[in-house]
Amino acid sequence: MSQGRSNEGAPSVHASAVKVGNLAVLIRGPSGSGKSRLAFDLIMAGRAGIVERAVLVGDDRVHLATVGDEIEVRPARMLAGLIEIRGLGIRRCDFVEHATVGLVVDLDAADAERLPPAESLKTSIFGVEIPRIPVSRDYSPLPLVVAALTTTKS
């Protein structure tokens, strides 16, 4: 890959991503787990001033690549600027061409706990360690993501 700017030949992954401030939140999870919903909730939280400005990177399928010691996420070309809104269908919205992944949210995570061990709060993508939030099926992910983006460890 030329300086990580091309995703030709890079496999796409089943995930959504939203750039919040300077870094992207990568949202993973099984089909129907709420990836698109969380992506749109983050965009709305940005518009409401709850988090920094939030813009879609990609919904449903994104490309990941190593750029230096960071992971970059890009939209899948055919889906760029499209997001699924349950009850409205596929909608067009603003998007960015790429962003550095700064947080991973795993929906329907088997290892989600009330007080998670430190090792479950990070993940590795292509050898790059990134903060992670495991979210159980029965818990709303938005408050956890907002907390991760706006608070610090005690």
Image (cartoon, grey):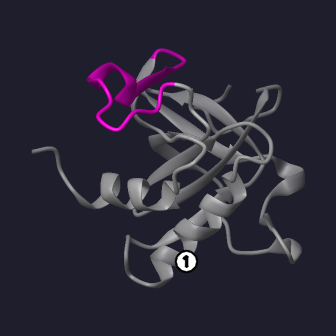
Q: Image point 84% across, 74% down: which residue?
A: 91
Q: Is residue 22 visible in this depiction of the protein? A: no
Stretch of the chain drawn in magenta: 111-127
Viewer-proximal residue among 30 and 15? 30
Q: From the image, tell me which residue sits under label 1.
A: 44
Q: Image point 62% across, 38% down: which residue?
A: 108
Q: Within the magenta stretch, is there residue 113?
A: yes
Location of residue 30 (image quadrant)? top right
Say which quadrant the N terminus sits in: top right
Going by the image, does 88 lie left or right of 57? right
Residue 103 lies, with reference to residue 45, above or below; the image says above
Q: Image point 79% across, 48% down: which residue?
A: 32
Tell me which amino acid carries mark 1: Met
Residue 52 lies, with reference to residue 47, above or below; the image says above
Q: Within the magenta stretch, is there residue 26?
A: no
- At which x and y percent is residue 46? 46, 75
Going by the image, does 89 lie left or right of 72? right
Q: Residue furthest left?
A: 154
Location of residue 43 (image quadrant)? bottom right
